[in-house]
Amino acid sequence: QVHLVQSGAEVRKPGSSVKVSCKASGYTFTEHYVHWVRQAPGQGLEWMGRINPVDGGTSYAQVSQGRVILTRDESANSVYLDLTNLQSDDTAVYFCARGMGDGYSFYFDSWGQGTVVTVSS
Amino acid sequence: ILMTQSPVTLSVSPGTRATLSCKASQRIGSNLAWYQKKPGQAPRLLISSASTRATGVPSRFTGSGSGTEFTLTINSLQPEDFATYYCQYYEAGTFGQGTRLEI
């Protein structure tokens, strides 16, 4: 059974950074891209980017460019979301999700439980 | 490509049918998925390729459409179906803004 388990809630001050982890199990890690999707309070779902677990290749949504870094550790079956220069509107729940399809045309068949990131002074 | 869902909120009674709409600003074939999202939970895949039910999804959930117009129909609404539903176009992970299904 596919499982994506994320790290716990974080509270950060504006201008700081946060790293969220997502550990995959129940499938061959290198066979699926892993994506990140966020949901701000009262808002909808927003795709942030994805990483190829084979070579670490990444693609980011325009809104993520420059402040989001996705990495992976194949030995740990884990991917990581680094969000830098945090602002109050980065307060959201961040989900990792397993992609079906390729790096450009995809949907999400399994999701992590979500990580709440709160940015507040 | 923009995905527009309607209505924003749909009020229905248990046991009845709900029809949710998702329209694409350009033709997208059948490259569409539907998700159910409840507060405090992760989204759940319901439908892929516009009409293929995901594993374990009850048969009361039906996806249809192609091109620019898509529909998610939920028959005989159960209490656990009241949630927000999102459509998603496969490319660039583009989501619609969601339809909240309320009692």
Image (cartoon, coloured by chain):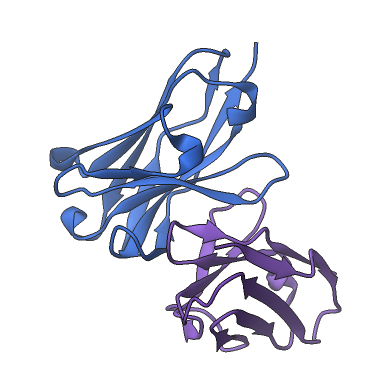
Q: Is residue A89 above or below residue A86?
A: below
Query: Residue A17 appears at what percent x and percent y?
Result: 44, 18
Using the rendered view, name the quadrant where residue B71 is placed.
bottom right
Residue at 41% across, 28% down: A66
Residue at 65% across, 51% down: A44
Looking at the rendering, in which quadrant would you find the C terminus of chain B? bottom right
Q: Is residue A23 left or right of residue A41?
A: left
Q: Residue furthest front?
A: B26
Query: Which lettered chain is shown in blue?
Result: A
Using the rendered view, name the quadrant where residue A27 is placed.
bottom left
Q: Is residue A29 left or right of residue B60?
A: left
* Nearer to me, A70 or B18: A70
Query: Residue B101 appears at what percent x and percent y?
Result: 77, 68
Q: Is residue A108 left or right of residue A15?
A: left
Report which colour depicts chain B.
purple
Query: Residue A69 appears at what percent x and percent y?
Result: 34, 31
Q: Is residue A99 above or below residue A41?
A: below
Looking at the rendering, in which quadrant would you find the N terminus of chain B? bottom right
Q: Is residue A22 above or below residue B79?
A: above
Q: Is residue B103 left or right of residue A86?
A: right
* Number of callouts: 0
* Nearer to me, B18 or A113: B18
* Nearer to me, A85 or A4: A85
* Nearer to me, B66 or A1: B66
Residue at 65% across, 73% down: B22
Query: Residue B38 appears at what percent x and percent y?
Result: 65, 57
